[in-house]
């Protein structure tokens, strides 16, 4: 792709760094920005700069937040006795979109993957036990992607918390094995949350397969 302007070329290169954005799509975005008013472009760029500088991670659940504690953890209307374990922030957004869950979350920031050098120390697990005890959590819901790594992570956490008086469940497997939670449609994901199962039932089935 040949450009008559180095400024255009540099802008296209930056947009092309985004996932799923090729150079042709990036060029369309840049040309659209050229047609916008200067103040609109400034607001567009400023929103990303401000987000990067001011965004925080919730001290409780590790979700993105504008303050030290996110709106979900701070809400008195949420069930503090339920804790949903997810891999990423995108999974929180996916589950919230179903409107089938009203408890709290705990974002791991990844899943166990020894081959990739990801062990328990790389995950947000340090405050999980204290959260369960402090909030008198009655149920932990494992909402991890149905992959070998996801199942391994769920098993590890269940084993670490086995001495606490908490019920551990997992989302129903309406989601195909090997699929990613964030790409599941809202109806299927919502049904999986509603019809969750005791995790020992799922683990026993996996052990026989």
Image: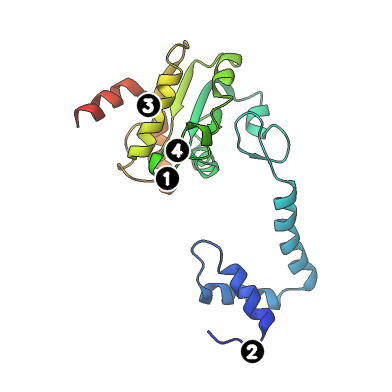
Residue 199 sits in quarter: top left
Asked if 68 appears above or below 160 in the picture, the reply is below
Label 3, on which residue? Answer: 155
Label 1 close to label 2 by CB (< 8 Å): no
What's the residue at 70%, 52% (across, down)? 52
Q: CA distance from mark 4 to mark 1?
A: 10 Å
- Label 1 sits on a secondary structure element that is helix
Question: Along the polypeptide, which appears first: circle 4 or circle 2?
Answer: 2
Question: Along the polypeptide, which appears first: circle 4 or circle 1?
Answer: 4
Residue 104 sits in quarter: top right
- The residue closer to the viewer here, 40 or 61, is 61
Label 4 close to label 1 by CB (< 8 Å): no
Label 3 close to label 4 by CB (< 8 Å): no
Categorize mark 4 by other alpha carbons within 10 Å: few (<14), some (14-19), many (20+): many
- Label 4 sits on a secondary structure element that is loop
Q: Is residue 129 left or right of residue 206?
A: right
Q: CA distance from mark 1 to mark 3?
A: 18 Å
Label 2, on which residue? Answer: 4
Asked if 31 appears above or below 128 in the picture, the reply is below
What's the residue at 70%, 78% (across, down)? 35
Q: Is residue 105 left or right of residue 37?
A: left
- Is the C terminus in the top left, top right, bottom left or bottom right quadrant? top left
Label 4, on which residue? Answer: 111
* In this rendering, the label closer to the viewer, 1 or 3: 1
Categorize mark 2 by other alpha carbons within 10 Å: few (<14), some (14-19), many (20+): few
Q: Give percent across and percent down for residue 48.
A: 70, 57
Q: CA distance from mark 4 to mark 2?
A: 45 Å
- The residue closer to the viewer here, 33 or 163, is 163
Q: Which mark is residue 116?
A: 1
């Amino acid at each position: 792709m040949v450009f008559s302007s180095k400024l255009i070329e540099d802008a296209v290169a930056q947009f092309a760094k985004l996932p799923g954005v090729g150079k042709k799509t990036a060029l369309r975005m840049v040309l659209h920005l050229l047609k916008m008013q200067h103040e609109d472009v400034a607001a567009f760029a400023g929103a990303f700069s401000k987000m990067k500088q001011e965004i925080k991670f919730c001290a409780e659940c590790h979700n993105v937040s504008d303050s030290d504690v996110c709106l979900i953890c701070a809400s008195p209307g949420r069930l503090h006795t339920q804790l949903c374990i997810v891999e990423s922030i995108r999974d929180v957004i996916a589950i919230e979109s179903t409107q089938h869950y009203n408890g709290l979350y705990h974002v791991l920031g990844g899943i166990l993957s020894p081959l990739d050098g990801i062990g328990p120390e790389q995950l947000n697990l340090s405050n999980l036990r204290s959260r369960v005890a402090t909030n008198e959590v009655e149920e932990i819901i494992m909402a991890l992607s149905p992959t070998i790594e996801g199942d391994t992570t769920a098993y590890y956490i269940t084993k670490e918390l086995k001495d606490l008086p908490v019920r551990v469940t997992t989302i129903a497997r309406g989601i195909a094995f090997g699929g990613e939670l964030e790409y599941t449609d809202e109806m299927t994901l919502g049904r999986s949350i509603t019809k969750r199962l005791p995790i020992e039932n799922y683990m026993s089935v996996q052990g026989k397969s």
